[in-house]
Image: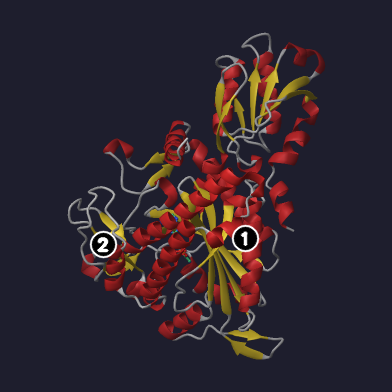
Amino acid sequence: MAQEDVFKKLVSHAKEYGFVFPSSEIYDGLGAVYDYGQMGVELKNNIKKYWWDSMVLLHENIVGIDSAIFMHPMIWKASGHVDAFNDPLIDNKDSKKRYRADVLIEEQLAKYDDKITKEVEKAAKRFGAAFDEAQFRATNQRVLDNQAKRDTLHDRYKNALNENDLEELRQIILDEEIVCPISGTRNWTEVRQFNLMFATEMGSTADGAMKVYLRPETAQGIFVNYLNVQKTGRMKIPFGIAQIGKAFRNEIVARQFIFRMREFEQMEMQFFVRPGSELEWFEKWKAFRLKWHKALGFGDDCYRYHDHDKLAHYANAATDIEFLMPFGFKEVEGIHSRTDFDLSQHEKYSGKSIKYFDPELNESYTPYVIETSIGVDRMFLSVLSASYTEEQLTGGESRVVLKLPAPLAPVKLAVMPLVKKDGLPEKARDIINALKFRFHCHYDEKDSIGKRYRRQDAIGTPYCVTVDHQTLEDNTVTLRNRDTMLQERVSINDLETIIGDRVDITSLLKQLI
Ligand code: GAP
């Protein structure tokens, strides 16, 4: 099946089973804003818990905060967001559609990559075991031509970004003959900068209302609280502050479902270190964050690092962790070495000293910062797309199953009486009443057992328990595994241990140490 079709199915599955709904749907929706339904909120909370525990429980020197969305507007001046939090936008005059110039060029780069990959795959099929990929890449003329075009484009693009050269970005789009996917024409406007922050007013106009912004990242709430936390928590460098919260960006192009939203959630951690040690910590956090992703078991091939072509002026290293979405490798998380830029700027704009006194060195300095920043919604999308599976079963049947990592699954256990009589429903309720303090359980007595299994498969429930007449005699039930569909007879007394070992977040956390 084409990847676009997989993606369409995923979006409709997410809606049909209560994971994600378009916001304000009865009013025809609101662009790039989504609501999480009864299943979605559970999955999202489990992702957040996995992240939070991996930071705050596993690291003695990381603590959490929850700062307000509204902050003093000077914060955004100091951080550079008022002047420079822009995207280069370009319009197609025929379709009147708006695009990000950088995204158009990156898609063009990806097209060259695709062409090369296709050539290599074709040759690998033709030559079989004798295929030498390195030699093929070094000698095949079509591969070499595409690689040369890609490299030239990449160099031009990188320079244009670094020089902030909007005219050159436009020229690249013209030279590469990039067309608008809607009108199919190359009738482009100039490239302009567009600030992504949402602004609103605080206080009534009579009082002289103040222009405030909806925060475009949670990180600044950490920077401006860093000394409060350091002093009240008696933290010693190196230490970190973690936060999960909403962020808002007036994205120019907001397509691809929950990949790029105007209201989204971030999980960010700022790690404060001694100047000079930041690149060592950058490498450590890069490795730790990739391990966190890989522990979910989707396969190492789903991930890659992508070093930034254009470093922000305050950063001395930056990498993205990309995930193989149905529409290609895409950024899910950023790891940035932000130097002392943010703290120094807040010191300058607030006029207050926020230096750290290092008792071991007996000197004060502005700490350097390593940031790990991941979008909850993008993580959600990556988990959903890697888990969505269509399976052909024996007997011509098929099923859609979400092979979610068990600790992230919204419902851990469905308990089903085989029939709605003979005391079986009551027994099933007893099991739920004993286990509901630890696991999110579902009770289901409607339809055939087969249909009930399919419903649970579709929301990714790792275990189903069936209560039958034998249960009343020997206190055993059948326990069905979502992925293997195998059933075993187990004692009700053992259920908590068997299920708990697999579904607790602890099983993921243990892989990280
Ligand atoms: N404090 C650093 C920062 O905000 P970023 O690369 O702009 O860095 C970090 O954002 C992460 O936030 C991204 O890797 C992505 O997962 C998520 N993110 C950013 N913009 C988003 C959007 N419009 N919709 C959904 N997630 C977004």
Estimate how packed mark 1 is, as few (under 14), some (14 to 19) or many (20 or more) residues with alpha carbons within 10 Å. many
Q: Nearer the viewer, mark 1 or mark 2?
A: 2
Q: Is residue 147 visible?
A: yes
Q: Residue furthest right?
A: 474
Give x and y (percent) for residue 221: 48, 68
- Against 409, residue 47 (above or below) is below
In the image, 251: left or right of 190?
A: right
Which amino acid type corresponds to the residue marked 1 in the rendered image? Arg
Q: Is residue 378 visible?
A: no
* Residue that label 1 marks: 289
* Residue that label 2 marks: 90
| Residue at image point 66% right, 49% down | 130
Asked which quadrant contains residue 440, the reply is top right
- In the rendered structure, which disc, 1 or 2, sits on the residue that comes first in sequence? 2
| Residue at image point 40% right, 53% down | 260
What numbered label is drawn on residue 310? Answer: none
Colouring style = secondary structure
Q: Is mark 2 within 8 Å of ligand 1?
A: no
Q: Nearer the viewer, residue 138 or 467?
A: 138
Give x and y (percent) for residue 133: 60, 55
Q: Residue furthest top?
A: 422
Give x and y (percent) for residue 178: 30, 57
For mark 2, give the secondary structure.
strand
| Residue at image point 67% right, 37% down | 437
Q: Nearer the viewer, residue 505 or 277?
A: 277
